Every structure is written in C-alpha cells, then in structure tokens.
C-alpha cells in the first residue's frame, strides 16, 4: 500500500513509523524545513518538504498510485483541504483527516451512501479531543482499567489494568492467580516496557496488566486484578477545555456525578452553558484549597484535562495526595508520558497517541494486519484458522515453536469466547486473537493459512 | 445620501410620525369598521364613527406620508426614540378612542372616556360602563379597541402598512413582550405578518365556536374580539355569567388559554422548528394554571363558598384562567370567596400567561426564571465558586437576561407599590387600592373590594381612574418602554447633585 502522511508531528511520525514497519510505502509531507531534516534519518519514509494542502505538491507526488492519505497537521483547515483535494485528484483513494473543531464534524445526512461517510467526502475524520474524552470515559466507567479495546464484534475485551497494592496479583507469581472468571493474562508493562506474561512472573504495584476476557466477565476480572477498584460515583474534571467538556458530556449520560474546574471565567461560563447536570466551578488556581473546596477528598476519580501538561501533572499529583482514588492526566507532549509512570499518577492519556491509534485502527480494517496499541506497546491480530492450516489440531501451549514470541489471547468458536488453556486445540473455522510485542506478530500468519 | 439632500425631518421625528401616524390610521380604520358593523343594527351613531374615523385616518395617513420616502438611518434612531414613539402611539390611540364615546354621550366626563378607551386598547377590560343600554356601535368600538390592542397596534401597523425602513424594529421590540426578542424571520415585517396571521386564525376559530354555542352574531363577534385579545369587555352587563351557558364558558376558557400561549410557539410548532424554550414556558404555564385551579377549588370546597362540586370547579377554573390570562371576564363573584382564594386570584394576576401572547402580567417565563435565579442564589451560598447558568427547557440564557429579568421584577414591584400608594391616596380603601393597581398594571380588569368581580370601576374616584389608566399603559408596554422615558429625569437629577 502506498501512503501519504501530511504533517510530521507526533501523530504523523507515529503513523509513518508503524505503517513503514508493516511494509507499506510511506511519503510524509512536512512544511518545516528543519523538521524535514531531522526526519530523514529517523524514518524509513520519503520526506517531502511542502504544504500538504497544496494541489501542486500533491500532484508532484503523483496521487494516482496512492491508496491512503492521512492529513494530521495541527491545523484543521490544512487537513480538510489536503484530504478533500486528494479525494478530488484520485477518488479511489481513502482519506483521513484530523479535525479538532467539532463544527466541521457534521454527520452526513445520507448514511446509506457508502462513498462519503464523513463530512466533505472524507472517509474518516478523527477528533483527537473527542477520542481522548471517550478513552478517559471508558477508563472511568470500567474501574481499574485505563483502556479497553473490543474484538470479535464486541464479544471479547482486552483491558489494560493498573495493579494496585491491594491487588491479589501483586507479589505473587501469575500462575497462582484467582481463576473464578475465565480470563487470559497477555502481558504486563513496567515503566513503559511491555512484556508477554509467563507463569512465574511476579507483578508489583504500579505495573499495568493486559488481560483478555469475554465481555460479560471483563468488569469483574478488571476489578479483581486491579485490587482496590471501586465504582466511580463522583468525578472531578480539572480543566474545561474541549477534552474536559466532552468528557463531562459523555459522563452526564451515566450515573457518575461530575464537577468541572475551570480557571478562565468566560470559558467556565461556556462550559456551564454546554453542560446540564454537571457542577462547573470557577477556581483560579490549582491550589490545595481550591481542590479541597471542590471536594477532591471524596472524589473517586480525578481527571486533569487542562491544556497545560505541567498544570495537569501538578493537579493530578495534588489530587492524589488529597485523597482522590483514581488520578488520570491528559499529557499532550510525548516527553512527559514516561514521567507519569515515575509519578504517583495512575495513567496518562496522550491525545496524539490516541489519534494515531485511532487512525491505525481505521486503517487496520482496510490494509494493516495488526492493530497497534501505541500506549502499551502491544499489538493484536485477529486471524481465522483456515482448513488444513498447519496450526489446526495443535494444542495451545505447545505452539511455542510455531508462534514464537506471541500469544493466543482468546478464541472465538461458534460465537462463544473461549479462553485458551493448556490443552485447548485449535480447529478450522476458529477466530483467534493473537497478541505480541514489537513486531513479533509479523511471521505468524502462514501458520493459519490453508496450504497453497 | 449626502448632507444637502438630507431630510429636514430627523430620523427620530420620522419614526415617531410613522408609528403614531400608523396607529392613528389603524384606529381610524377601526372606527370606520365600527360604522360598517353598526349598519346591521340600529344605526344612529354611524355618523359619529364614520366622521371621526375618517378624520383620524387622514391625520394618520398624513403622519405616515410625512415620514415615508425619507432615508431613515437605523443607527440614528436611538432606543429612547423607539420607546417614545410607542408610548406616544398608545397614548394617542387612547385619546382618539375616547372621542366617539364622548360625542355619543356614553360618558360625560373626558377622564372616564379616556379610562374606558385606555382599558380597551391595553386589553385590560376594566370598565366604567354601568348603563348597558347603549347603541350597538359603542359595544362594537369597545371590542374593536381591544382587538387592535391585543396583538399590539405597532405589530399590526408593521404587518399591514408600508412602513419598511430600519428604524421600525426599535418600536416593534418596544411593544412585543418577552425576555428575548423572538424574531421569527429575518425581516421584521414578515414576523409581524406571521403574528397577525396566528391572531387571525385564533379569531376565526373563536368566532365559529361562539356561533356554535348559540350566541347571536353580534354577541359572538364582539366576544371573539375581546377573547382572543384577552381583553374582557362584554356586551352583557353581567359579563360571561350573563349567558349562563356551559358552552359559552368552555369556548371562552379554551380560547383564553390558547391566547395565553406564546405566538412564537405556534409558529415554531407549525414550521417544525426547535420548540425550546417556548415549550418549557407553555408547560410551566399549564402547570401553574391547573395548580392554581386545584388550589382555589379546594379552598372553595373547604370554605363552602360555592354550592355544588361541579359549579365550584367550573367557577374556579374560569376565574383563575380569566385573571391569569389578563382577560377579566366574570362568571363567579370571586370577591365573595374566602380570603385564601382572593389572595391567590390577585397573585395569578401578577403571574400572567406566556411572553409573546396577548396577555399581561410578569409572564410565566420570567416567573420561572425568577424561581431558578432564587434557587441559584441559595446554591451559591453553599458553593461560592459554582458557575451558574439560567436555563429554560435546556436552553441557556445569558447573564444579561438574568439581569434583565431581575431588573424587570424590581421595577414591576416598585411601580406596583407606587401605584397602590397613589391609588390609596385618591381615597379608596386599602383592598381596593391594592387590588385595583394590581388589576390595571397586570391588565386584567376586575379586582377586589369596590371594584370586585361584579362591580365596575365607578367605585374609584377620578384621580384613581387616571392612576389606573397610567398603570394600564405601563403594564401593557411591559414597564421598561414607559419607565425608560423618565430616565432623563434621573440623569439630570444626578448631574445636579
């Protein structure tokens, strides 16, 4: 597949990196000459200096052979024009645009018309703030988890869980764990390094656990492994920007009671107008007093979603000290993300990584094989076991030689979720969720394919 | 247009000439219509109405002619001139409306004729008429005055007369009631036409319904005009009670309730537009109305004021509706009820019906917002940094609206207090003074005491009648329009001190 990425920011570079590693031909267009220079060495991609919204630049690259264009600069209008222009030059191409302003994201009225799903005929429009708010909301609504992904038409969930000190997993080998609910522990991350799980691994508080379970067992599984997770009833959102407002809007449709703190009087007013039952407080600072006044001590969750990373980290740390249970923070700049692991904050949400992930997920359905979890470092691949494939009849647990460096997370057989145990045999027709780290999934496919 | 060709008449004077001229023309046409209507009955007074009407129409057309063809610069028309134009228009309508009543001899005293005319145009329905042995033309005229005043004379003028030009919206908004300007269409003229159209549909419906109940065409048309305008004048000395007909009462009740709904709501409903916040107001209106009916009914049953459950419900429902919509028809003598019911009746006068209807009072939307603002004040004591948004039906209102509503209420109470004081100063008892200024300020009609449901305003001395006339005008134009005219007085006072 030939891909053009417009904008070499964090989103663009992550896209280019994953797509390039997957064997696609990537061209990246970047406006800033300085940035172009540093990119050449970093990426296995063709770097073109120029304006991605310019038809001249696009024509010079030659859009006729391009399959996908992802416009992910910081500027909505540039992304929209680039995507619309590309579509006009080559209607067969798939286009993706990153658009923050919700005013642009008007739903097309004619939903049957497959050719134009998003606004202006763009195939996929991703709003980073909206996506981030949804991810945070999922983490708030599934206590103990920081992110959840569903597979197999939603029957199978893959969750990232924070292991707390009260967790029964902490300090014990994984093989001794409670197995009341069928679940499969895929792997874990410590200080941002992903590892596939082994029975003898011992987790510590603060580690993140990747666990697969059928949808109906997911909430209990997550709660059990997380240890102290309890249902979020009161939630404080620090910062009434786009992410904070959207998050409060999503949570308003749930039983969670939300309080939004906003520092700017006018913005606080706008947020209050947009929200219904949410209590909006206008507090000037991140001071201890202001947080205490908002009732942070009794809050089950504290989400720092202001525009300033430093203020977010500070507020989340403060909230943790003052007794908020679950403290999450939005962190925009990549370099701050590792800090979160070092600090006493439960999880960080990077809108840029979430955006890149969402675009990869969209592309995944069309061209990419594996789904990439940029935040935890894991990859997932849904495969069907074909008739006569070499893996048929093999027992899980004895497949190490064939499936080196990856795991069978779960099997969907006859519409049922089957959590693999040692001894489970794979049959033709099974749908298998394979999980791996760092490209280990690249070589598994032939084992599932029918012999040609 | 350059300076040399600029009209000698300034933009403000042109606006006043146009609005007052248009109003006079409408009143003149009304009188001519009365002359035509009276042709069907005994027609001795036709000449008076035809003559005065023609004269007033000509003066009015001259006013319009004076102003038309001039380039009106919207920016030059300050809000003050809009208020002045509308107040002057209503005052001049009341003055010319009194003339035929004086000439025919219905009233000997100019003040009485002026009061009756003001009560007519403002759709109050308070009357000084004791002797109902009058020519048909007098009844027609009372009804036509209310019909013209119901929708608003300026609205009518804008809808019908060729008064395009940018200054007119100042006058339009000075007359239309409500917390926010409900402009239904980009052009003010189209908005006025829509309002007039809805008024027309209500009129047709009411006339057919009254006809069906067996009223004579004379009675049916008169009552149609005074019901859709929520005016309250009747051709019967005992008002609606004189018909002693459940059918008539039901029609009056239904049409009054319909006329109490925001006209913009009907328009939005027909067009399939977003109904908020008008729907929320209509809902609150119907809830307050039914709640008050239940409360009055229970109090009447406990006190045993009215005989029979059916009669009690019938009288309670009609009386509450008639005062809440500011109509002023009478079926039961609520002045003879228990004190709880009497006080509640006066309170319903203040509540009024929906903004943008033909009714008076504070209006349900403001009452709702006042309650919400009060609750938010209490909440703010508990959570001082909370950001509070005033909402109606989910739609947020700006802080200016909060200020405007609180300011309106403040002025309303102030005007009411001063009016009651002035009324009492003219030598009436406290109950009459307090209820009399309430019923005129809220443009209802009947009050308590000397001016009870079955009495006329003749129990109030001349001075009180003038106070009442002033309160009717202030109430019809929703306080600000008239009171703002006094603003320069306060300003100069401040400069001197």
Image: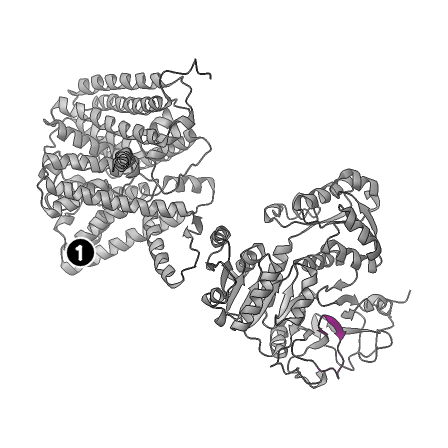
Say if residue A44 shows up in the picture: no
Q: Position of residue A148 (x, y in %)?
A: 65, 67
Element class at badge 1: helix
Instruction: State left or right for residue B114 relative to residue A272.
Output: left
Q: Position of residue A1 (x, y in %)?
A: 83, 53
Residue A195 falls inside the magenta stretch = yes
In the rendered image, the vertical position of residue B259 relative to residue B297, given as above or below: above
Residue under numbered circle 1: B340
In the rendered image, the vertical position of residue A181 relative to residue B249, given as above or below: below
How is the protein colored in the picture? one colour
Chain holding disc 1: B
Quarter of the figure with the C terminus of chain B: top left
Q: Residues within 10 Å of mark 1 (few under 14, many from 20)?
A: few
Which segment did they paint magenta?
A: A188-202
At horizontal 17% and vertical 39% (from top left) the residue drawn is: B239
Q: Kindly indicate the quadrant of the structure image that contains residue B3.
A: top left
Q: Residue furthest right?
A: A452
Q: Position of residue B421 (x, y in %)?
A: 15, 43
Residue B133 falls inside the magenta stretch = no
Nearer to me, B475 or A385? B475
Q: Kindly indicate the quadrant of the structure image that contains residue A355.
A: bottom right
């Amino acid at each position: 597949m030939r891909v053009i990425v417009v904008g070499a920011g964090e989103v663009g570079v992550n896209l280019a990196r994953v797509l390039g590693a997957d064997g696609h031909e990537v061209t990246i267009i970047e406006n800033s000459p300085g940035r172009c220079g540093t990119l050449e060495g970093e990426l296995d991609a063709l770097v073109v200096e120029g304006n991605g919204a310019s038809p001249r630049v696009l024509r010079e690259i030659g859009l006729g052979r391009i399959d996908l264009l992802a416009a992910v600069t910081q500027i909505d209008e540039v992304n929209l024009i680039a995507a619309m222009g590309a579509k006009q030059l080559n209607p067969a191409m798939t286009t993706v645009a990153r658009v923050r302003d919700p005013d642009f994201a008007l739903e097309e009225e004619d939903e049957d018309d497959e050719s134009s799903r998003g606004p202006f005929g763009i195939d996929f429009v991703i709003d980073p703030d909206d996506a981030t708010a949804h991810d945070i909301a999922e983490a708030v609504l599934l206590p103990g988890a920081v992110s959840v992904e569903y597979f197999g038409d939603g029957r199978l969930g893959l969750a990232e869980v924070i292991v707390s000190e009260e967790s029964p997993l902490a300090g014990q080998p994984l093989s001794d764990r409670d197995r009341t609910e069928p679940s499969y522990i895929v792997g874990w991350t410590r200080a941002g390094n992903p590892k596939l799980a082994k029975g003898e691994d011992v987790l510590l508080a603060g580690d993140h656990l990747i666990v697969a379970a059928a949808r109906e067992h997911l909430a209990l599984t997550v709660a059990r492994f997380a240890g102290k997770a309890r249902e979020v009833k009161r939630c404080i959102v620090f910062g009434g920007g786009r992410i904070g407002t959207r998050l409060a809007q999503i949570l308003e449709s749930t039983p969670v009671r939300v309080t939004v703190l906003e520092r700017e009087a006018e913005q606080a007013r706008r947020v209050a107008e947009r929200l219904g039952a949410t209590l909006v407080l206008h507090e000037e600072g991140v001071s201890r007093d202001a947080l205490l006044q908002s009732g942070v001590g009794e809050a089950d969750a504290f989400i720092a979603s202001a525009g300033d990373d430093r203020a977010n980290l500070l507020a989340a740390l403060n909230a943790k000290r003052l007794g908020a249970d679950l403290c999450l923070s939005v962190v925009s700049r990549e370099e701050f993300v590792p800090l979160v692991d070092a600090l006493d904050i439960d999880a960080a949400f990077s809108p840029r990584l979430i955006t890149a992930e969402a675009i990869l997920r969209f592309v995944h359905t069309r061209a990419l094989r594996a789904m990439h979890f940029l935040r935890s470092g894991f990859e997932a691949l849904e495969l069907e076991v074909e008739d006569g494939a070499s893996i048929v009849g093999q027992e899980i647990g004895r497949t190490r030689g064939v499936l080196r460096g990856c795991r069978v997370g779960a099997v969907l057989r006859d519409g049922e979720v089957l959590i693999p145990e040692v001894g489970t045999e794979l049959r033709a027709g099974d749908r298998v969720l394979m999980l791996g780290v760092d490209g280990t999934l690249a070589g598994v496919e032939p084992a599932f394919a029918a012999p040609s | 247009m350059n300076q040399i060709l600029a009209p000698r008449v300034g933009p403000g004077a042109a606006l006043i000439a146009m609005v007052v001229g248009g109003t006079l023309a409408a009143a003149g046409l009304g009188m001519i219509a009365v002359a035509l209507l009276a042709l069907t009955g005994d027609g001795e007074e036709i000449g008076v109405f035809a003559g005065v009407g023609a004269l007033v129409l000509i003066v009015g057309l001259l006013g319009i002619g004076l102003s038309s063809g001039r380039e009106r610069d919207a920016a030059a028309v300050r809000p003050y001139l809009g208020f002045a134009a509308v107040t002057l228009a209503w005052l001049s309508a009341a003055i010319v409306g009194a003339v035929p009543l004086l000439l025919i001899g219905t009233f000997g005293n100019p003040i009485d004729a002026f009061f009756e005319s003001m009560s007519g145009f403002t759709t109050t329905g308070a009357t000084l008429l004791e002797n109902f042995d009058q020519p048909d033309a007098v009844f027609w005229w009372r009804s036509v005055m209310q019909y013209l005043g119901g929708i608003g004379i300026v609205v009518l003028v804008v809808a019908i007369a060729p008064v395009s030009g940018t200054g007119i919206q100042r006058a339009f908004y000075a007359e239309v009631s409500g917390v926010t300007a409900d402009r239904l269409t980009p052009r003010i003229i189209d908005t006025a036409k829509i309002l007039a159209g809805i008024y027309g549909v209500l009129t047709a419906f009411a006339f057919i319904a009254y006809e069906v109940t067996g009223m004579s065409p004379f009675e049916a048309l008169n009552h149609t005009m005074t019901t859709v305008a929520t005016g309250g004048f009747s051709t019967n000395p005992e008002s609606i009670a004189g018909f002693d007909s459940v059918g008539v009462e039901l029609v009056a009740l239904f049409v009054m309730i319909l006329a109490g709904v925001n006209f913009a709501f009907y328009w939005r409903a027909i067009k399939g537009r977003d109904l908020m916040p008008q729907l929320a107001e209509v809902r609150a209106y119907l809830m307050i109305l039914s709640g008050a009916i239940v409360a009055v009914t229970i109090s009447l049953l406990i006190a045993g004021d009215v005989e029979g459950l059916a009669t009690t419900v019938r009288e309670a429902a009609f009386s509450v509706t008639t005062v809440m919509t500011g109509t002023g028809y009478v079926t039961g003598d609520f002045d003879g009820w228990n004190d709880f019911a009497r006080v509640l009746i006066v309170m319903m006068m203040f509540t009024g019906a929906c903004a943008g209807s033909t009714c008076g009072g504070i209006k349900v939307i403001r009452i709702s917002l006042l309650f919400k603002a009060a609750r938010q004040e209490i909440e703010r004591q508990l959570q001082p940094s909370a950001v509070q948004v005033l909402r109606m039906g989910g739609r947020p209102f700006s802080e200016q609206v909060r200020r405007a509503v609180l300011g309106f209420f403040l002025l309303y109470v102030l005007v009411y207090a001063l009016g009651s004081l002035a009324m009492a100063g003219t030598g009436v008892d406290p109950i009459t003074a307090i209820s009399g200024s309430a019923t005129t300020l809220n443009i209802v009609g009947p009050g308590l005491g000397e001016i009870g449901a079955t009495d006329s305003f003749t129990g109030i001395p001349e001075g009180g009648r003038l106070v009442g006339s002033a309160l009717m005008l202030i109430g019809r134009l929703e306080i600000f329009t008239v009171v703002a005219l006094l603003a320069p007085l306060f300003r100069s006072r401040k400069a001197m001190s």
